[in-house]
Image (spheres, helix red, strand yellow):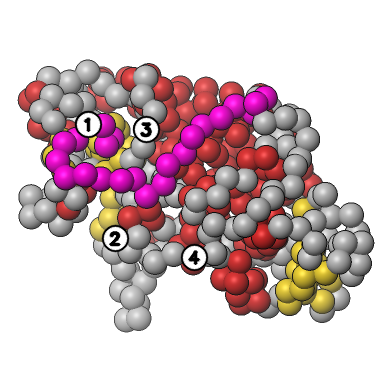
């Protein structure tokens, strides 16, 4: 049975027989009542996690650290689902993959690793893909839902819902040596200080030129300028779209690490769509825009091997005022844009980007400013 509302859940107890069923993607035992209880627990865990993030900025920081560990491979529901299960088991997760096909082409089997007997699967929401009938496609389109179609007009194979699937953490496997693509050392907000600190030193990612290219591909000019000149004022970077002018400016007197971080922050403003491209004056709240852009920069650079926490953690969610819907929208935007940028910066076949979630569509654009 598929559902179109992926949320977070916890692991359930398993017998060896149950584990064998879960490896095949079938929930072990139980009927409709047990499934209903599980889905209710999923929703409760998801809502509780969102409420904690909305109420306490440090929990948001921990969340984006967790996201960075997996290169934004998972949707919001799956990120929270995995985090809750890992915390309940008392482990620091490093990497998740499904058991894999028997031919060894996917999952842990592709890395010549095997899940130990008796291990309990972690649950995730996996997309259900099939070709809808023409009648179903017409109903979806009438309801305002986009339907992908082939050049002939026939409905294409696409995501039609989600089901609970299974994945396993590295610590549950044995076999050939495996190094996770990213490693995150989680820290607490209060350990980093209250004010923003400029990053110092070299940029270990080497993505600056690629970031500039992504910005110019969006139709913007890019300039490094002296502080307090051009459009900068007292900011480290600014993105302007006004009366035919589309330009991103970044300070030219900061170290390479900060220059890359600020450039990525401005690209995130463009990709998040922080000013309507039609010129409408309506914008998202400044605090939300900065939180989204800075969180995207933090996730992408951590996934690529650079810790931006000294600067990033100064941003908080005061704008949300505990509103779960706003925090959920913010988190979904951050995950979508971070994954999109990582895909643009890396080989799409890289395992850090492979996951069970459907790739997100491209975002549209426009305006932001990184404070000093």
> Viewer-proximal residue, 186 or 339?
186
Q: Earlier in the sequence, mark 3 or mark 4?
A: 3
On screen, residue 76 above or below 241:
above
- The percent coordinates of residue 285 (x first, y second) are 77, 46
Furthest-front residue in view?
201
Q: Residues within 10 Å of mark 4 (few under 14, many from 20)?
A: some
Which residue position is annotated with label 3? 93
Helix, strand or loop at mark 3 = loop
Q: Determine contact: label 1, label 3, CB under 8 Å.
A: no
Q: Earlier in the sequence, mark 2 or mark 3?
A: 3
Pair 2/1: label in front:
1
Which residue position is annotated with label 4? 345
* 31 horizontally vs 17: left or right: right
Which residue position is annotated with label 1? 172
User: The magenta stretch spans which residues?
Assistant: 169-191
Q: Earlier in the sequence, mark 2 or mark 4?
A: 2
* 269 horizontally vs 105: left or right: right
* 89 horizontally vs 53: left or right: left
Q: Which mark is residue 132?
A: 2
Helix, strand or loop at mark 2 = loop
């Amino acid at each position: 049975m598929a559902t179109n509302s992926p949320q977070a859940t916890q692991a359930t107890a398993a017998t060896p027989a149950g584990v064998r069923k879960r490896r095949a993607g079938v929930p072990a035992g139980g009927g409709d009542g047990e499934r209903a209880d599980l889905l209710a627990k999923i929703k409760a865990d998801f809502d509780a996690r969102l409420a904690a993030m909305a109420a306490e900025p440090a929990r948001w920081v921990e969340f984006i650290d967790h996201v960075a560990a997996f290169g934004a491979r998972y949707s919001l529901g799956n990120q929270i689902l995995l985090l809750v299960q890992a915390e309940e088991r008392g482990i620091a997760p490093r990497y998740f993959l499904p058991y894999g096909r028997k031919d060894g082409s996917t999952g842990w089997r592709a890395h010549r690793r095997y899940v130990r007997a008796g291990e309990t699967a972690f649950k995730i929401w996996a997309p259900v893909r099939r070709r809808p009938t023409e009648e179903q496609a017409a109903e979806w389109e009438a309801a305002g839902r986009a339907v992908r179609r082939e050049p002939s007009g026939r409905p294409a194979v696409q995501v039609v819902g989600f089901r609970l699937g299974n994945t396993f953490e590295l610590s549950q496997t044995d076999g050939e040596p495996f190094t996770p693509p990213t490693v995150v050392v989680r820290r607490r907000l209060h350990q980093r200080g209250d004010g923003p600190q400029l990053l110092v030193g070299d940029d270990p990612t080497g993505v600056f030129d690629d970031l500039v290219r992504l910005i110019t591909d969006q139709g913007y000019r890019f300039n490094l300028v002296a502080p307090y000149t051009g459009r900068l004022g007292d900011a480290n970077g600014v993105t302007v779209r006004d009366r035919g002018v589309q330009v991103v400016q970044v300070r030219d007197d900061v170290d390479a690490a900060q220059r890359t971080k600020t450039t990525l922050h401005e690209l995130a403003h463009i990709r998040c769509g922080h000013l309507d491209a039609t010129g409408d004056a309506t914008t998202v709240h400044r605090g939300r825009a900065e939180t989204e852009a800075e969180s995207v920069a933090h996730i992408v650079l951590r996934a690529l091997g650079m810790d931006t926490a000294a600067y990033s953690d100064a941003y908080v969610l005061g704008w949300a005022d505990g509103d779960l819907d706003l925090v959920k929208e913010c988190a979904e935007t951050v995950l979508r844009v971070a994954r999109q940028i990582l895909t643009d910066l890396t080989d799409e076949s890289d395992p850090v980007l492979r996951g069970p979630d459907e790739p997100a569509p491209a975002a549209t654009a426009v305006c932001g400013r990184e404070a000093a």
